[in-house]
Image (tube, rainbow, N blue to C red):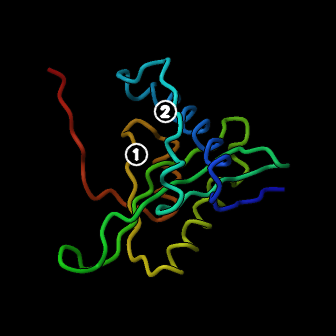
Amino acid sequence: MIEIKRVVDYQIAKECDDLLTKLIQSERRFDKNIKPSFMVDNYYKDKIDKDILFLAYKDDIPVGFIYGYIKYKKGELAYKNVIYIDALYVLDEYRNMGIAKKLINKFYDYCYENNIDIVEIAVFKDNVEALNLYKKLGYEITEYKMKKEL
């Protein structure tokens, strides 16, 4: 059984740090600048009080997470409230079980409850698996991010 819980505890946030390390390491195939030895430590502990972090469990084992933050609040700069999904990850061995979709739906529940109008996410252009997931969920490409090595 899959269970999705909001992270409000520092110790549980550490489990998300471990999953974020795995996410970043998995992204090395798209960004060769990421060091193989990079590890996340205490990244989420300061974020759980103000941002949105959900952890997915399968049989009490943490298997995935989603993290986001408010990017724009309706007001002087923006017409609508915008939230940014900064990270979404499910361990390889638990993929294709609907966990990412459950995490996203839980995230959307938060958005509806908090009057969020727009959800944004960035994806590596070669990450076909993620692009297909987000397109299936109704996301559209709205901008391109570019870089140049010097």
Structural crowding at the residue carrying mark 1, measured as other residues with C-alpha within 10 Å and reported as few (<14), some (14–19) or many (≥20): some
Residue 145 location (% of width, % of height):
24, 44
Q: Which residue is mark 2?
A: 24
Q: Give me the residue at 24% from left, 48% from top.
A: 144
The quarter of the picture where the C terminus appears is top left
Answer with the quarter of the image where residue 95 lies. top right
Query: What type is the residue that disc 1 sits on?
Result: Val
Q: Is residue 18 above or below residue 99?
A: above
The quarter of the picture where the N terminus appears is bottom right
Q: Is residue 21 above or below residue 110?
A: above
Q: Which residue is mark 1?
A: 123
- Residue at the far left: name it: 150
Residue 31 location (% of width, % of height):
37, 27
Q: Give me the residue at 41% from left, 66% from top.
A: 119
In this rendered view, identify the residue nearer to me: 68 or 28: 68
Query: What type is the residue that disc 2 sits on?
Result: Ile
Left/right of residue 106 with respect to residue 40 in the rendered view: right
